[in-house]
Image (cartoon, rainbow, N blue to C red):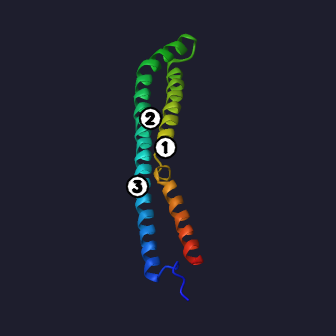
Amino acid sequence: MNDPHEKSSAGLLGDTITTVTSLIRNEVTLARAEVSENMNQAAIAVGLIAGALIVALVSLNVLAAALVVGLTNLGLDAGWSSVLVGGVLAIIAFAMVAKGTNDLKLSKLAPTRTAKNVRRDAESLKETYNDA
């Protein structure tokens, strides 16, 4: 009457707990790896911002003076030469800072693969135990 291959409720519950525990352990491991990878990307982004600031300072000190002198020698007033050179260098520095800060957004640091896997695992468990 009872099929010897059928598991008892306690057996099914034990299997479920083991499966869920294993899934959680695996997802935590994946989340740690993904957060570590994302933190490396954040470190690179911070490096980009620091590099942008250094480039901006060096370029303002070295090239600005040379460009202003060059434009002045071409006939442009020294004041307007300074404004033109400063504006171009400011645009370059702004673009570098924008790229660095964009790479630091929390949405880029979140463990998206882990979240996707958790949703997939939950759906799989629902299907498995709804069929049982």
Q: Which image quadrant is residue 17 in?
A: bottom left
Q: Amino acid at mark 1?
A: Asp
Look at the image and tell me in which quarter the N terminus lies: bottom right
Label 1 secondary element: helix
Name the residue nearer the viewer: 45 or 66.
Answer: 45
Please provide percent x and percent y for residue 101.
47, 43
Please provide percent x and percent y for residue 111.
47, 54
Q: Amino acid at mark 2?
A: Leu
The residue that label 2 is drawn on is: 48
* Residue 97 in the image: above or below residue 7: above
Label 2 secondary element: helix
* Residue 92 in the image: above or below residue 8: above
The residue that label 1 is drawn on is: 103
Circles 2 and 1, Cβ within 8 Å, touching? The answer is yes
Q: Which image quadrant is residue 128 in?
A: bottom right
Residue drawn where x is 51% and y is 81% of the image: 4
Callout 1 environment at 10 Å: few (<14), some (14 to 19), or many (20+)? some
| Mark whose residue sits in front, 3 or 1 | 3
Q: Earlier in the sequence, mark 3 or mark 2?
A: 3
Q: Quick check: 94 left or right of 18? A: right
Residue drawn where x is 54% and y is 75% of the image: 129
Q: Residue placed farthest to the top in the image? A: 73
> Which numbered tag is attached to residue 29?
3
Look at the image and tell me in which quarter the C terminus lies: bottom right
